[in-house]
Image (cartoon, helix red, strand yellow):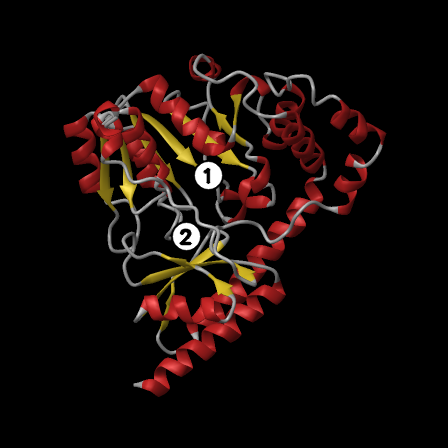
Amino acid sequence: MEIEKFVRPNIKSLTPYQAKEIPCRVKLDANESPYGLSRQVLAVLSSRKGRDLFLRVNRYPDPEAGSLKKVIAANLKIRPENLLQGNGSDELIYYLITTFGGPVLFPTPTFSMYGIIAQAIGEEKVGVPLDEEFDLDMKRMLREIRLNKPKLIFLSTPNNPTGNCFSSDRILRIIESGSSIVVVDEAYQPFASEKGFIPLLRDYENLLIMRTLSKIGLAGLRAGFLIGSQKIINEVNKVRLPFNLNSLSQAIAEEVMKRGDILKRNIKSVISERGKLFREMSEMDGIKPYPSEANFIMFRTAATDAIYEGLLNKGVLVRNMKGVVDGCLRVTVGTPEENRTFIAALKRVVSNRGRKK
């Protein structure tokens, strides 16, 4: 049987997201937090409350994730009715494009799932290159918005993989530019110096915010949240799969979020280590790190493939941005020990390349 003839054309030409598991000693390629569950959370999960939870896995989870949403809402100073839970932000992107359709517009380079999901669903995608400072190119953005009349615009700020926040005034101009729904993806906002766009939700009904717990230590739980007006949340909720956030993820996330002081301490550590990494990389010949407001640093270097392989040979895995931002690599901020290992390995690899010239 020729399976290909049954596959829709938009799927035939689709390149899947690559999430390979590559053996390494220090994993700094996926923008994960270096910090896992705290002892306090583990203690709760091993208590009677935790044991009761595990004994109830024969039952479906709370379909509305009500208890967890109350904790998240209190943390963000919003109402639970303004939240919709997702199995990670990826699922929420699916829901948004399914609900509102396309065209779907986003700057490039950015998080690849906006384009991948739009194509998978069969909607038109429009990528608009960033300017030389990796900020929104307003002339191009406004022109493409006018020509394509997108239903959805995704703006990731801080942006992955560049690490910078887009200018707030430019984002506001896009929100105010027309009838598009603008989704500000704040996956990395906890590491940024700016407060984010949640306070502006009351002023712009076409504004939505996405947040995730993945970058602050809970990537394995796959817990993301869409934040917006109750009217929009109700519409997107129509396409949400039932029981989309499992019981264990809900319970663990709730316990972690109740202990916000631990999360804040871990985030503060990442921000501090990011500054140290940037300073040390800035002093290295042939390495140009870009300022970052996220939990990673993108850096430019000659012979990126050789540098990438050299680091991997020393047990350090980073992300090669070839095809996305050519000539660049991206390193996740790890623990102080992991960062020291990375810097030492990078110095040796760069030094070895210098001697070979």
Label 1 neighbourhood size at 10 Å, few (<14), some (14-19), many (20+)?
many
Q: Position of residue 113 (x, y in %)?
A: 36, 37
Question: Residue at point 77% right, 46% down?
Answer: 39
Residue at disc 1, secondary structure: loop
Q: Find residue 98 and report its image quarter.
A: top left
| Amino acid beneath label 2 | Gly
Residue at disc 2, secondary structure: loop
Q: Is residue 100 visible?
A: yes
Q: Is residue 204 visible?
A: no
Residue 219 lies, with reference to residue 66, above or below; the image says below
Pick the residue in front: 9 or 356: 9
| Amino acid beneath label 1 | Glu
Question: Residue at point 40% right, 29% down?
Answer: 93
Q: Is residue 230 left or right of residue 96?
A: right
In the picture, the quarter occupied by the N terminus is top left
Q: Which mark is residue 155?
A: none
Question: Which residue is label 1 attached to?
Answer: 186
Q: Position of residue 279 (x, y in %)?
A: 48, 70
Q: Position of residue 310 (x, y in %)?
A: 42, 71
Pick the residue in front: 101 or 163: 101
Q: Find residue 218 and report its image quarter.
A: top right
Question: Residue at point 39% right, 26% down?
Answer: 94
Label 2 neighbourhood size at 10 Å, few (<14), some (14-19), many (20+)?
many
| Residues at marks 1 and 2 touching, judged by CB atoms closer than 8 Å | no
In the picture, the quarter occupied by the C terminus is bottom left
Cα–Cα gap, marks 1 and 2: 12 Å
Q: Which mark is residue 163?
A: 2
Q: Position of residue 251 (x, y in %)?
A: 69, 29
Dot 1 or dot 2: first in sequence order is 2
